[in-house]
Image (spheres, grey):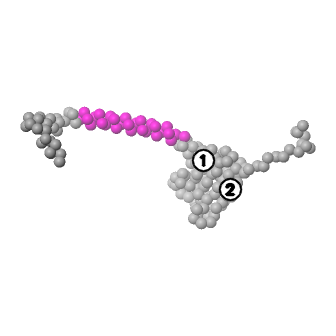
Amino acid sequence: MGSAGYWALGEEEQRDTTLTTIRGLLDDPAPRAAAVQTGGITAVSAAAVGGAVYGLATRRRREFQREWLIPLHEAISVPLGISELTDPRRYLHVPRNFSDDDAEIRIDVPTHMRFNEDLVADLVAKKLALENVSFTWRRAGRDTHVVVKKRRVPPRKLGLSDPGVR
C-alpha cells in the first residue's frame, strides 16, 4: 500500500531524488544525532519541570507526615504489634485538620486484638496533643479500627445566680 504511493510519484527522476534523500539521512549520522540531542534535552527538561511541580505539590503532605504521622507510627506500632517498616499511611488515617472540633481520626488496628487499648489511646492522645477526645473501638469482624473524635462539650447554661451575669 505504501509502495503504491511511492510509485505514484511519477517520473524516474523524482523517485531517484527521494531514494537519494532517504539514503543520505540513513548514512549521515549528524541529523540523527541532532534529533536525539534535541529530544534528549526536551525529555530532561520535561522531567525536571515535572519533578519540581510534584515536589511542590507534595511538600505539605511530606511535612505533615514527618511532623505527625511518623512519630505517631513510631509510638504505637510496637504496642499494636505492627511492623515498624509498615507505611504509616496504610493504617493511620489522620486528616491535616485533626485538631478541629469536627475532625475524625481513624486507626486501623490488627484483628488479633492482643494489645492494650488504654495504652494505645493514651499514646495517640499524647503524640497528637489531643485533649477531651473519645475513642470508639470497633472490635468485631475483619474491619477492626478505632475512631478518635473530640468530645462535644454542652454549652454552659448561665443562671441568674451566676456572679458574672449582670
Say left or right for 122 vs 29: right
- Earlier in the chain: of badge 2 and badge 1, it is 1
- Residue 132 sits inside the magenta stretch: no
Q: Which residue is mark 2?
A: 135
Say above or below: 43 vs 95. above
Residue at point 66% right, 45% down? 99
Residue 106 image-quadrant placement: bottom right
Say above or below: 27 vs 147. above
Say left or right for 92 vs 10: right
Q: Which residue is mark 1?
A: 95
Q: Tell me the crowding category of disc 1: few under 14, some 14 to 19, or many 20 or more residues within 10 angstroms, Cα based.
A: few
> Magenta residues?
33-60
* Residue type pointed to by label 1: Pro
**What is the number of the mark on residue 73?**
none
Residue at point 46% right, 37% down? 53
Residue 95 in the image, given as x and y percentages of width and height: 60, 47
Q: For marks 2 and 1, give the CA distance.
A: 16 Å
Q: Residue furthest left?
A: 12
